[in-house]
Amino acid sequence: MERFLDVRDLNVEFGSDRGVVRAVNHVSFHINKGETIGLVGETGAGKTTTALSIMQLVPGPHGRITAGELLFEGEDLLKKSEREMRKIRGGKISMIFQDPMTSLNPVVTVGDQIAEVIKLHSERISRQEIRKRAENMLELVGIPAARYEEYPHQFSGGMKQRVVIAIALACNPELLIADEPTTALDVTIQAQVLALMARLKKELNTSMILITHDLGVVAGECDRVAIMYAGEIVEYGSLKNIYKETKHPYTIGLFGSIPNIDKKDTRLVPIPGLMPDPANLPKGCCFAPRCQYRLPECESCHPQTAEVSPGHFVKCLRAQEGGRTNG
Amino acid sequence: MGEILRVEHLKKYFKTPAGMLHAVDDVSFSIEKGKTLGVVGESGCGKSTLGRTILHLLDSTDGKIYFEGQDITSVSKTQLKELRRNMQIIFQDPFSSLNPRMCVSEIIQEPLEIYRACPDKQSMQRRVAALMRTVGLAPNLAGAYPHELDGGRRQRIGIARALAMNPKFIVCDEPVSALDVSIQAQILNLMQDLQAELELTYVFITHNLSVVKHISDDILVMYLGRVVEYSQGDELFEHPYHPYTKALLAAIAVPDIDRQNERILLKGEISSPINPKPGCRFAPRCELCTDICRKKTPPTEELAPGHFVACHHVREMNGAG
């Protein structure tokens, strides 16, 4: 399989009053055609910033990409002009944002919002044709085309998210970045939206980056997973690597924090402490202050990424030792 | 241990320009001292309204509420103030439920001031320090303001404030929903420890089924203001009877790659709670729906000891009784 998007050593910084905030540090991963990769982490882990970097939407002037390469179909997105990027955004790469309540324009009908994308990315297309394609998109995500003229406030949360998905998929993107697409939705609606996304992804053979904090959603949707913590990918591998051969103490901690639905466990095993201040990251391993397996070296030496088995990468000094085996 | 709270046929309707909104409709349950009742349901099912009506933050439309055997459905203002010593609430959003212009110690001591619980300043400070220790807040945070703290710490302040008057009963309205998983686990553990230590009784309102299973003794499943299923927690997860409960359980995204649920995809979305027609509220989305479901409100039946279900077709579907 060809590497479709290759993110190499990405670094993003934000300038702030308190100094430089290193939001994303040395992040590398790749996506193959038709694959779904999950980007998992808690608030402030740098998931959304990574996604915005790919779209070149890191808010300036405070935020900037300081190093790295973003190879998309062999070309570096960072070297593209703004004009070229505009063609790519919404065309070849598109994004679903977390909050459907705020990512739609309240004064434009949902149909026209879908039509806008089609108009921008298609050359010499008649108005009737645009309207027809926008209506098809609505039907595709399960909204009757008769609701074309309605405004976002007339839709429920789940329906709005369907509209956002229709906008994102309107130009058959090759890569879809979904930033917490179901976090704002109720569970039964989440199940509907996830099923819809999985079906459309298959039909259109789209690759996807799914950003979420929910390891349950990842287990159902992704082929490979990257676990992020304090701007770094701490563990990266196939679903099986992450769920069954968990190595990094942070990933182990994440699993320990989720109540198990099958067992009546009396106590959760949370990760003590809090995420470090991104303006003042520890010198050694970022997770060391919260880690129960830390060695004295962990506090001084920044761990390198080690490949513990083919395709399974772990950023921990003790990566070669044990870890959690499950089932 | 005896019963601490009993709610009978509780109703809460809101007047809206479009008609009567049935937020809570005919809800009955009881809780024993030291236990946790989990209330689950999706947004708009009336679970928060239920919690607030029990605490008299909203006036009930109809029905009875008994606290420690005493009818508290209609109480005077002075009685209510006394009652609130024993009944407290922890709110969902630790970002908007704390006064941004009060520091941590002021927030926690406010209830102590209102009830004149401490004879002098020193004892008040000691009590605040003790409460902060109980919920795991470092003493040097006493002068900090909420905006300086993260969500987990803010939620700890909310818990300390609720505990200030040694209540017996706490309504926890989505206390961990706004928190990251690793912090969520810390707060859940804290709440369980406090319950064991102080013999607290919780009504735990949440939309997260894994959390509710973890923390609850009994579980109440709500849909559009009505209770569709009510049972002991493990029993509910092992033998869900109501089609809505089944769909809800199947929709849980399980963090296990070997055990992916056969998803039951519900069609459509929650219908309007304004002037609902008679009949089962879940009928428009239900696969088993027949004529009777659209015409007659299903009675609540006890299918197994302590396991109540409101569905016309539950017996034939599950071969019970």
Image: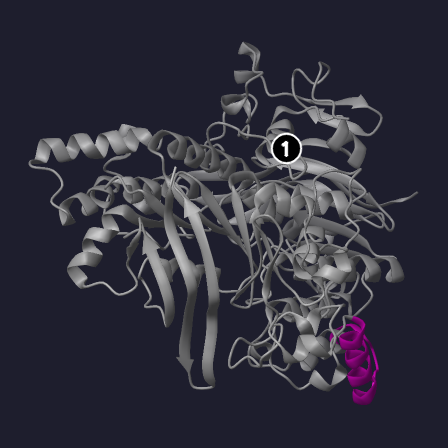
**Which quadrant of the view contains residue A187?**
bottom right
Up/down of A2 relative to A179, above or below:
above
Is residue B239 visible in the rendered structure shown here?
Answer: yes
Residue farthest to the bottom, as pictured: A128
Label 1 resides on the chain identified as A
**Which quadrant of the view contains residue A39?**
top right
Query: SS for tag 1?
Result: helix
Q: Amino acid at mark 1?
A: Phe
Up/down of B25 relative to B92, above or below:
below
Point out the image quarter for the C terminus of chain B: bottom right
Q: Which residue is mark 1?
A: A255
Expressed as whole percent of the image width and height from the top left, the position of residue B112 reads 17, 43
Expressed as whole percent of the image width and height from the top left, the position of residue B77 reads 18, 62
Residue in the picture at 76% in, 78% down: A119
- Does residue A180 appear to the left or right of A277 in the view shown? right
Point out the image quarter for the N terminus of chain B: top left
- Does residue B195 appear to the left or right of B70 in the view shown? right
Q: Is residue A134 magenta?
A: yes
Binning the other alpha carbons within 10 Å of mark 1 as few (below 14), some (14 to 19) or many (20 upward) gives many
Expressed as whole percent of the image width and height from the top left, the position of residue B63 reads 38, 67
- Does residue A46 appear to the left or right of A112 in the view shown? left
Q: Which residues are magenta?
A: A120-140
Is residue A278 visible in the rendered structure shown here?
Answer: no
The answer to which of A51 and B235 lies nearer the viewer is: B235
